[in-house]
Image: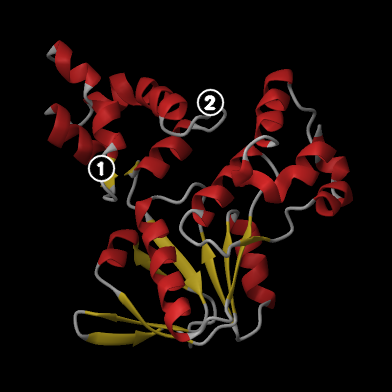
Amino acid sequence: MPGNLQHISAPTIAHLDGEEFLERVFSKRCLRDSKYFVNHLRAKTASVLSQFKLGSRDLSADEILQEAGLFRSSDELLFTGPISIEINNQTIDFTPLKHGAAIGARTVKELEISALKADTIITIENKASYREYCSQMDDNTFVIYLAGFPGPMKRLFMYKLYGHAQKYCQGIRFLHWGDIDLGGFRIFKSLKDVVPTLEAYLMDASTLLMHRDQCQELSKGYGIQLQKLLDDPGYVEFREVVEQAD
């Protein structure tokens, strides 16, 4: 492997321009070897992106690379609720699928929202929470499973949902239910950059106190990272819970 190719991965990934790739496809295309990225550059690239693109060192390599648009396996978009989409001049109504549906994340580029009969849209980070919520939700809620950090296609889907809501149904509430930790807060911020009206759901200080017995002791480094959020206006929703957790 030529030496200059060892330094191409991080800047190339940082400028994928909203595309998503499997790691092996990316490696073959950019490094001429489908396994080289995973075997030699994955950890280093995640570290570089974490420090200079995300400004965080506490996320897993999978989360960092997914946010940038790289996935180990094909990414899917799971959702449940009253939505119809148009793709290739055909309209598909997902409303009757009460137990949810899935589409390939890259399909998001090709679709348009044709109807959305919901008053609440909620994204959920954890799959168990997603399944539980869907089993109890009403007919006026649209739910999306994130599976961790949302990649470019999931953020694009949120952008399209928000655009449709602004044009046709401005009363829709956008919520996000994630873990009460650094990763959860950063996922929320990533989504709110796309959906300015996004609200946190069950991510407040009272929820933290209710489940205090399940909390893990914070390391000194983790506590420092939390404290930095107090000075960042992008995390204003979480100041109370961060102060409570410290």
Q: Is residue 33 visible?
A: no
Above-or-below relation of 65 to 144: above
Q: Which mark is residue 57?
A: 2
Q: How is the image coloured?
A: secondary structure
In this image, 41 relative to 148: left or right?
Answer: left
State the image coordinates of residue 222 (x, y, percent, origin top left): 68, 26
Question: Which badge, 1 or 2, comes first in the chain's sequence?
Answer: 1
Q: Amino acid at mark 2?
A: Arg
Is disc 2 surrounded by few (<14), some (14 to 19) or many (20+) residues within 10 Å? some
- Amino acid type assigned to the residue bearing label 1 in the image: Leu
- From the viewer's perspective, is 102 left or right of 121? left
In the figure, 139 relative to 153: above or below? below
Residue 67 versus residue 233: which sits nearer the camera?
A: 233
Above or below for 145 versus 135? above
Q: The C terminus appears in which quarter of the rendering?
A: top right
- Measuring 36% from the left and 52% from the top, which residue is drawn there? 152
Between 49 and 1, the one nearer to me in the picture: 49
Is the Cβ of the residue at disc 1 closer than 8 Å to that at disc 2?
no
Residue 171 seen in render? yes
* Number of other residues with Cα within 10 Å of mark 1, as a class: few under 14, some 14 to 19, many 20 or more: some
Percent across and percent down for residue 202 are 74, 58
The residue that label 1 is drawn on is 16
Q: Secondary structure at mark 1?
A: loop
Residue at the far top: name it: 3
Quadrant of the rendering where the N terminus is positioned = top left
Helix, strand or loop for disc 2 = loop
Q: Residue at x 41, y 58 (%)?
A: 154
Where is residue 87? Give x, y as percent: 25, 78
- Measured from the top left, where is residue 125 in percent x and y? 58, 54
